[in-house]
Image: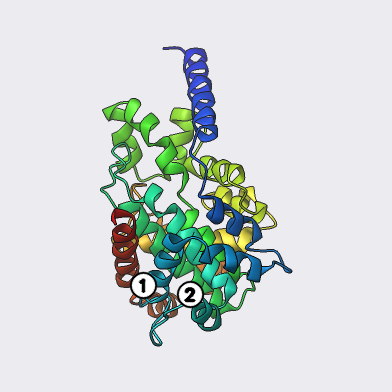
Amino acid sequence: MTDEDMDAERGQTEARIREAIRRQPPMPALCGEVARRIREPNADFGELAEKMRMDPGVTMNVLKLANSTYFGGGGRVDSLRHAFVRLGARRLFQLVVAQGVASRMASRLVGYGLEPGALLRHSLCVAMTAEALTRKLRLGFEETIFTAGLLHDMGKPVMDAFVLESGPQAQTRLRNEPLSSETVEMDLFGITHAEVGSLLMTEWGFPIDLAEIVRAHHRIAATTLHELPARMVRLADGFAACSGFGGGSGEVNSELLAEDKSKLRLDPEAFDQLAEGIPEKAAELENMLTMIHRD
């Protein structure tokens, strides 16, 4: 096959992937509304809370999450009012987003070689680690970094069918080469899972800054306004993979991990202490979200 033929094939596949993004089922209405308002400085949380109360399923699921070790940990939360007081409105709405997207991230991704729950568990680990780093360094974007970490690989469920279609040799490259998965994806499809995830978030009405962090989390040089949060997500992504909670992207690039720690002026020992216990909490939360959607 000539280079021209390969370029034409990549272009056709990219067009099909972009069409697949447009065909994705919409977010639950309440979840989408929360996503749009999560960064509004004057959001009417009272109105949103009332809408939550009108959906018993969402209310029950959010209260389950509010009582988890990670989100709760300080006594039983037994009502939305109590959850608002204990956790704060923005944290509560992060839980709405988490339970709204969990079912899409909990499936087996055959093309990427991910067992059921693996992507969700990885994404939760990334979200928790990025949030802990941001809080420690007091960087001022704590309200968005958990959601950005949670959704950083949302493009993979969309692309998985195309990875599977590409055949065993391409799948082996994607899973095993010591390269960023984005490098292989771009070579195969002309678009990466980070770009697909960003486009999907835009379709769903997520804030532009969140979509940009997701788009740039492997290629920090591709962003200027969101370098720090994108770097946080990339560092947390590497930590999750080193902890055995990989996202199916081959070997960890230790040079990039060292670069991110250096740029953020993080002492490696302090980072390890900061992230201690997060993988176990991510596994607990993944089990809880999986049971919620199984019920």
* Image quarter in which the N terminus is found: top left
Q: Residue at x 47, y 41 (%)?
A: 193
From the viewer's side, name the closer residue of 274 and 143. Answer: 143
Residue assigned mark 2: 132
From the viewer's side, name the closer residue of 229 and 68. Answer: 68
Residue assigned mark 1: 278
Q: Residue at x 29, y 57 (%)?
A: 295
Q: Amino acid at mark 1?
A: Ile
Position of residue 82 measured from the top left corner of the image (x, y, whole percent): 50, 82
Mark 1 crowd level (few <14, some 14–19, many ≥20, 10 Å Cα): many
Which badge, 2 or 1, is on the more N-terminal residue? 2
Residue 262 in view in this figure? yes
**CA–CA distance between discs 2 and 1?**
9 Å
- From the viewer's perspective, tell me whether residue 245 is left or right of residue 226: left
Q: Amino acid at mark 2?
A: Ala
- From the viewer's perspective, tell me whether residue 260 is left or right of residue 221: left
Q: Residue at x 31, y 65 (%)?
A: 288
Query: In the rendered view, how is the structure colored?
Result: rainbow
Q: Residue at x 44, y 35 (%)?
A: 185
Position of residue 99 measured from the top left corner of the image (x, y, whole percent): 43, 59
Position of residue 53 measured from the top left corner of the image (x, y, whole percent): 52, 66
Q: Which mark is residue 245?
A: none
Q: Are marks 2 and 1 in contact (CB under 8 Å)?
A: yes
Mark 1 falls on what kind of element?
helix
- From the viewer's perspective, tell me whether residue 37 is left or right of residue 194: right
From the viewer's side, name the closer residue of 277 and 205. Answer: 205
Indicate the quadrant where residue 239 lies.
Answer: bottom left
